[in-house]
Amino acid sequence: MIPEIHIEDYNYGLDDSRIAKYPLPERDATKLLHYKKGTVEELRFRDLPDLLEPDTLMVFNDTKVVPARLHFQKESGAHIEIFCLEPVAPSEYNLSFAATESCSWKCVIGNAKKWKNDLLSLYNPASDPLLEELSLKAELLSREGQTGVVRFVWNGSYPFSKVLEQAGTVPIPPYLNRESEELDTQRYQTVYAHIRGSVAAPTAGLHFTEEVLDRLKQKGIEMETVCLHVGAGTFFPVKSSLVSEHPMHREPFVVSRDLIARLARKNGPLLAVGTTSVRTLESLYYIGVSCLEKGAPEDVEQWAPYTREYSYTTQEALEAIVKYLDSKGLKALVAGTRIIIVPGFRFRLVDKLVTNFHQPESTLILLVSAFVNGDWRTIYDFALKNDFRFLSYGDSSLLERE
């Protein structure tokens, strides 16, 4: 049964002054709120290794943010901003990034009403010679509201990844109310970012430094990665009062066969770094169910966890995915998820969560509430009273589930 949840019940007062507009000079100097069994304490993020048991398995999202925001200009002088969301042709990220001369992407289009069917030229006010050589153009193939499919064409043999590096800017969150700057290129990216494809950073990972990762290794804590490419939907507000009317966007993810097999036999606690890692890991159960019942994995739909009872154990579901992958000679599961995690959700894999402080009335607040059995206000009241910094560049928390 789909839960009846009113988003107004997940509001809190967040003054603009509490939103961290810039990161601290040192990544691991941020505050860390530790929540366990209803109690809250304040530490520093660099204290994280001291709070974890040696048999903990940590899972990180190693997606890499791409400079996906491009600025074009019409012959009339009007500016059009194009925000690349996901590749259309070629449809695979790695193939699209490797494409030369042309490719097509689904995009969010700023100032969309002013763009009909004319070919746009890249905005290049400084007459950068490399950008002039690229001669990047944009053609609108189709439109749906504020989004559309855009075909990019350019000169030379440069791959599209190089085109974005030269012509694009880092798509920092709109609530920062500023243009992206040089420091965002490095700091709006985790130190372990590896696979290009996100248009937003998995921000819980921004606090990790090589020193913190080394201390975790020295303690014997094991670390694995998944890859979920974060879409622009992470910034989309919940506009309807009833959460059941809010459509979740699809996000693609990849999990290795070996990690799934390992999760099926795990003994110690599983710590997910970030809500994207949680959504990926918890989606595995429902993909395992589709393998058991339909013989193959299917994308996880938004309300799948709530619309029926599931009798399979987590181990059975995960082993079914491994069996399927082995039968096809595959080394990894490639799938997608629209899963929404709200109060009433049954967590089947994740025991602990590292996450930042999220916007009021957001799906991520709902996820946090579900994780701490409804006690989210204890956490947020403490953070507000103790001058924690909020949102992407803000402070962090370690939440432990009962």
Image (cartoon, grey):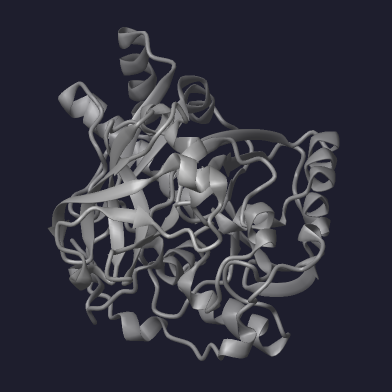
Count every numbered label the image shows and give the total: 0
| Image-based side of 202 in relation to 209, left or right | left
The residue positioned 34% from the left and 74% from the top of the image is 237
Can you say which quadrant of the picture contains the C terminus?
bottom right
Specify the quadrant of the image occupied by residue 313: top left
Q: Nearer the viewer, residue 401 or 108?
A: 108
Quarter of the rendering occupied by the N terminus: bottom left
Instruction: Point out residue 137 in the picture as x, y percentages from the top left corner.
Output: 32, 48
What residue appears at the point 40 percent right and 44 percent down from the top-left corner? Answer: 135
- Expressed as whole percent of the image width and height from the top left, the position of residue 178 reads 55, 76
Q: Is residue 310 left or right of residue 274?
A: left
* Image position, residue 323 (x, y; %): 35, 15
Q: Which residue appears at 19% of the width and 72% of the height?
A: 113
In front here: 174 or 153?
Answer: 153
- Whether residue 127 is visible here, answered yes or no, is yes
- Residue 343 sits above or below residue 267 on the image: below
Q: Quadrant of residue 344?
A: bottom left
Residue 256 point in image, percent of width and height:
48, 25
Q: Is residue 348 visible?
A: no
Q: Nearer the viewer, residue 33 or 165?
A: 165
Q: Nearer the viewer, residue 5 or 111?
A: 111
Look at the picture and state if 148 lies above or below 259: below
Q: Is residue 273 left or right of residue 186?
A: left
Q: Is residue 120 left or right of residue 181?
A: left
